[in-house]
């Protein structure tokens, strides 16, 4: 699996997982503010990866993936807050956080590789 393909598939799977976490927080924990932020940033990653696939130039590609990387970092922040506040169980929070960190690594690798190619 190429790194770009991995980014596409993993960001989509991550978005679906964020939707499920959002639903859980809404229905079970009655948490509405942080969960909405998590949903927005967690699903934006995949949308930006898809946008990057149709980039008009290498610079545009890097720019869109850089925004996806920012969204992944923001998602990590919301996950930290939700876990540390007790809305998410530590084991669940750590599992989702591991997925977010993996996306950050993949996106960072793609961006670095693309920037170094001529």
Image (cartoon, grey):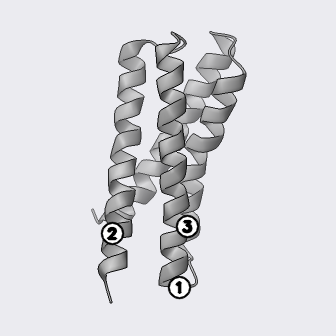
Comparing 78 with 42, the one in front is 78
Residue 36 percent coordinates (x, y)? 69, 31
Labels 1 & 2 near each other (Cβ < 8 A): no
Sequence order check, earlier mark of 1 and 3: 1
* Residue 110 horizontal side relative to residue 74, left or right: left
| Label 2 Cα neighbours within 10 Å, binned few <14 / some 14-19 / many ≥20 | few
| Label disc, if present, on residue 103 of the rendered structure | none
Labels 3 & 2 near each other (Cβ < 8 A): no
| Label 3 Cα neighbours within 10 Å, binned few <14 / some 14-19 / many ≥20 | many
Residue sitting at x 40%, y 32%: 97
Residue 65 percent coordinates (x, y)? 49, 64
| Label disc, if present, on residue 64 of the rendered structure | 3
Mark 1 or 2, closer to the camera: 2
Comparing 30 with 64, the one in front is 64
Q: How many marks?
A: 3
* Residue 40 horizontal side relative to residue 111, left or right: right
Residue 58 percent coordinates (x, y)? 47, 82
Residue 83 percent coordinates (x, y)? 47, 18
The residue indicated by pointer 2 is: 112
Residue sitting at x 53%, y 20%: 82
Q: Is residue 70 visible?
A: yes
How far is disc 1 from disc 3 in space, using C-alphas? 11 Å
Q: Is residue 17 visible?
A: no
Q: Which residue ends up furthest to the bottom in the rendered image?
A: 118
Q: Secondary structure at mark 1?
A: loop
Work out whether 40 lies above or below 45.
Answer: above
Work out whether 97 lies above or below 5.
Answer: above
* Residue 113 horizontal side relative to residue 45, left or right: left
Residue sitting at x 37%, y 77%: 115
| Label disc, if present, on residue 57 of the rendered structure | 1
Please identify the quarter of the rendering in which residue 99 is found. top left
Q: Secondary structure at mark 3?
A: helix
């Amino acid at each position: 699996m190429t790194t770009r393909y991995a980014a596409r598939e993993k960001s989509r799977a991550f978005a679906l997982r964020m939707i499920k976490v959002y639903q859980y927080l809404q229905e079970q924990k009655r948490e509405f503010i942080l969960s909405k932020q998590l949903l927005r940033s967690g699903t934006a990653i995949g949308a930006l990866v898809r946008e990057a696939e149709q980039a008009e130039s290498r610079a545009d590609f890097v720019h869109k993936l850089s925004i996806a990387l920012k969204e992944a970092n923001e998602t990590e922040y919301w996950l930290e807050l939700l876990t540390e506040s007790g809305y998410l169980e530590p084991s669940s929070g750590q599992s989702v956080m591991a997925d977010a960190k993996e996306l950050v690594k993949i996106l960072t690798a793609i961006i670095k590789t693309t920037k170094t190619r001529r």
